[in-house]
Amino acid sequence: MSQVQVSPALMALAASRTAVVSATTASEEAQASHTKLLTRRSELQATSAEALRAARDYGDADGKRALAIKIADLDLADLEVTIHASADKLRDLNVALATARANCAQCEQDAKLEENSIALQAMLKIVAANEEGYLASVAELHRLFVLVNGKSMGNGTVWKCHQPTAEHRALVVSNAVPALRG
């Protein structure tokens, strides 16, 4: 079984993705909790409004409805403090989530750049090996050409025995590859 080396960029990407998942979970849990608080506030407001309506419609001789309104209003005041704290926490968690997502996007770019750099290095090795083989083949072609045709050819023998293709010439002219030297 071969060992695969994990690069720092890939480790950073994995960590950033984990951070995004954690931040998303925390944000979603905080949102659910905040929604419950808002629901509870609506219930308390409804209770207070119902007690007030009942007091207006039926009177409140024994004070039970006034007590219910007072309790609902006190609970509502306490709940408002909790709702504001929850909203602040939710805002902070959403900022942390946005930061984690931005960091993850940067880590993905860094990992892609590293992946492309590794591929480039591998391709450069392949090209160097192929170029070495190509030049060795041209040298052997030249040696055999001279053996067959004699040494009367003078300068330019390599070009006489090995004419580059039109594609190769076009690449040399456009400076995409260096000229073949004989």
Image (cartoon, rainbow, N blue to C red):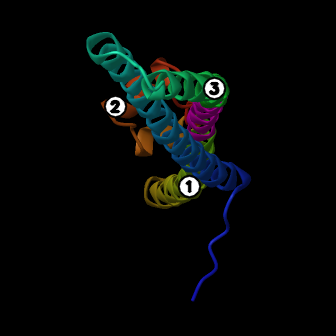
Percent position (x, y) of residue 87?
60, 25
Q: In this view, does 47 lie above or below 49?
A: below
**Three-letter residue code for mark 2:** Glu
127 and 51: which is toward the camera: 51
Specify start and end residues of the magenta stretch as a single range: 91-108
Residue 51 among magenta residues:
no
Residue topped by disc 2 = 167
Tell me which label, 1 or 3, sits earlier in the chain: 3
Q: In this view, does 107 lie above or below 14?
A: above
Q: Quadrant of residue 65?
A: top left
Residue in the picture at 50% in, 34% down: 37
- Give the crowd class for mark 3: few <14, some 14-19, many >=20 residues within 10 Å: some
User: What is the secondary structure assignment of the residue under circle 2?
Assistant: helix
101 and 35: which is toward the camera: 35
53 and 113: which is toward the camera: 53
Q: In this view, does 181 lie above or below 47?
A: below
Tell me which label, 1 or 2, sits earlier in the chain: 1
Residue topped by disc 3 = 95
Cα separation between marks 1 and 3: 65 Å
Residue topped by disc 1 = 139
Cα separation between marks 1 and 2: 21 Å
**Whether residue 151 can be seen here:** no
- Give the crowd class for mark 1: few <14, some 14-19, many >=20 residues within 10 Å: some
